[in-house]
Image: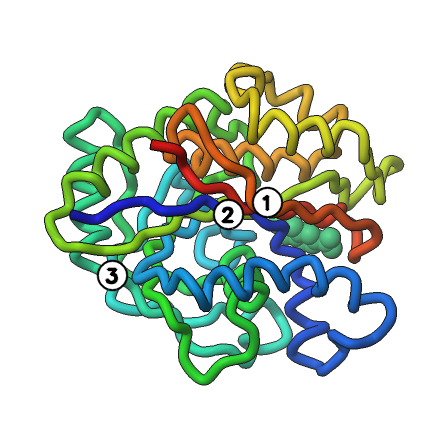
Amino acid sequence: MARITAGITTSHIPAVGAALDNGKADEPYWQPVFAGYEFARAYERDTKPDVVILVYNDHASAFDMTFIPTFAIGCAESFPIADEGWGPRPVPEVQGHADLAWHIAQSCILDEFDMTIINAMAVDHGLTVPMSLMFGQVDAWPVKVVPIAVNVVTYPPPSGNRCWLLGEAIARAVASYPEDLNVQIWGTGGMSHQLQGPRAGLINKAWDTAFLDKLTADPEALRHMPHIDYLREAGSEGIELVMWLIMRGALGPEVRELHRHYHVPASNTAVGHIVLEPLP
Ligand code: DHB
Ligand code: FE
């Protein structure tokens, strides 16, 4: 049987990808950002997941105002790297797991969770930066990926509780997949960031830290938190954090926190990263 063995969250800051791609990772500004990912890099090498269900948001790369799926699942065999304005990042194409993805789509939809099925989709920094953080600069990614793209760009994004329930539905889908697969689920985006307007650059470390604490130990407190709390406390792009609840909902009530990393500054956001394992 397939099983979800870990949940990982991380910021997906585009400048982090650019730092890696341009050989700046050892510079004093970036070194402490990347140092916080060494645990997860080793964890990935040791645990060798087969598939990552990668929850992220598209930033007007694959979707624009023409189509705005709330929850989209990538069912393709592979996903090209998006050109976000200065050419695609020099990273390998992302390989999908079409069979598992179609199984999750079927299971979730029949479980009354209507997903948009996407068979061709370029993936942007929201997906590729977390891949680079976990696997470094490689010729081919060592895992297959089932992308789950969530709308957090155009109002209204899904509620935290809806994200949590989707995580639970994804976990049921994985548990009913017959092949023996080691599956991880990642949530990306966040933490505090406000990219425009008079509050640009807002960082709220106390709130971010409390969010990380609750994600591990008291996720029920996050489930029903309204969007306005994310916006007020973590900035307008801090709403990306709602995607982390899909990861957390998929892990079940009790988890073990293996690692945490929080760092400022990194571009305009607070870097937040956590590694969790579900408890039986
Ligand atoms: C930044 C962070 C993001 O999550 C994003 O999508 C774009 C920019 C930033 O910090 O610059
Ligand atoms: Fe983003």
Query: In the rendering, which numbered label is found on residue 97?
Result: 3
Residue at (79% x, 67% y) in the render: 30
Q: Is there CB contact under 8 Å for labels 2 and 1?
A: yes
Quadrant (top left/top right/bottom left/bottom right) for the C terminus: top left
User: Which mark is first along the chain, 1 or 3?
Assistant: 3
Asked if the residue at label 3 sits under 8 Å from ligand 2, the reply is no
57 versus 43 height, above or below = above
Among the two numbered marks 3 and 2 on one chain, the one whose residue lies closer to the N terminus: 2
Q: Nearer the viewer, residue 114 or 255?
A: 255
Q: Which corner quadrant of the image does residue 134 belong to?
A: bottom right
Q: Nearer the viewer, residue 72 or 260?
A: 260
Amino acid type indicated by mark 1: Ile
In the rendered structure, which amino acid carries the disc numbered 3?
A: His
Dot 1: within a 10 Å radius of its alpha carbon, few (fewer than 14), some, or many (20 or more) residues? many
- Secondary element type, mark 1: strand
Which residue lies under the disc numbered 1?
A: 274
Q: Nearer the viewer, residue 177 or 121?
A: 177
Give me the residue at 73% from left, 46% from top: 262
Figure label count? 3
Q: Is residue 135 above or below residue 114?
A: below
Q: Is residue 120 visible in this depiction of the protein?
A: yes
Q: Dot 2 corresponds to which residue?
A: 8
- Percent across and percent down for residue 206 are 80, 29
**Residues at badges 3 and 2 in contact (C-beta under 8 Å)?**
no
